[in-house]
Image (spheres, helix red, strand yellow):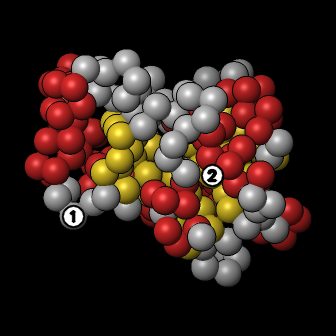
Amino acid sequence: MRLVVISGFLGSGKTTAMLCFARELTQAKRKVALIVNEIGEIGIDNVVLQQAGANVWELLGGCICCTLAGTLSTTLEMLATEYNPDIVLMEPSGASLPDAVKSGLRHVKQAPIEVSWLTLVDPLRLEELVAVLEPLMEAHLRAADAAIITKAAVATSEQLAAARSWVAGLRPDVPCFCADLASHEPQLPLRAILPCLS
């Protein structure tokens, strides 16, 4: 089972990315499941995500990287045995610590899960977020197999260049893409970002 973690701080476009990629994968006849981590007790994203035609599982009331680590492994085990998806798209909360999420994944008792990690970078707020949350932002990027600079349609060329420079400064080896994932016809297929999904 392939797990694709879509991380990024609040407002970076994680839910939009999940919806975009879930539609793409279901249209390609891939069996997709979505895991959404809501820190609050009431889920919001799942209503939007169900529009993609995928099954949605919510983990409420905590963060995947700490209080819900057991629930995450249980959820993944249940998905593997009862639903057997080709790909699971997972959106951790923006406050999740990547190392702790990865540690929680080691408790899954099913066959090994192949994990890919996408980190979304918001060019409109990057300077402010790095100033306040630099260790968390860097941790997400250091975990990434690929980075996506979102909101390309509304960001200025200077903002996009600054975001690319920030990514390259920390991870010159990571593939970096710019995209407007909110577009009805996004030009950035997930399989182009993660060729392992082809």
Disc 2 on helix, strand or loop?
strand
User: Which amino acid does the dot numbered 1 rest on?
Assistant: Asp
Q: Residue at label 1?
A: 173
- Which quadrant of the figure has residue 178? top left
Q: Position of residue 93 (x, y in %)?
A: 50, 36
Disc 1 on helix, strand or loop?
loop
Labels 1, 2: front one: 1
Task: Say if 71 sits above or below 126 in the image.
Answer: below
- Which quadrant of the figure has residue 84? bottom right
Front position in the image: 134 or 181? 181
Front position in the image: 91 or 15? 15
Q: Is residue 163 visible?
A: yes
Side (left or right) of 194 relative to 59: left
Q: Residue at label 2?
A: 89
Q: Earlier in the sequence, mark 1 or mark 2?
A: 2
Task: Say if 187 sits above or below 161 in the image.
Answer: below
Residue at left offset 27%, top offset 60%: 174
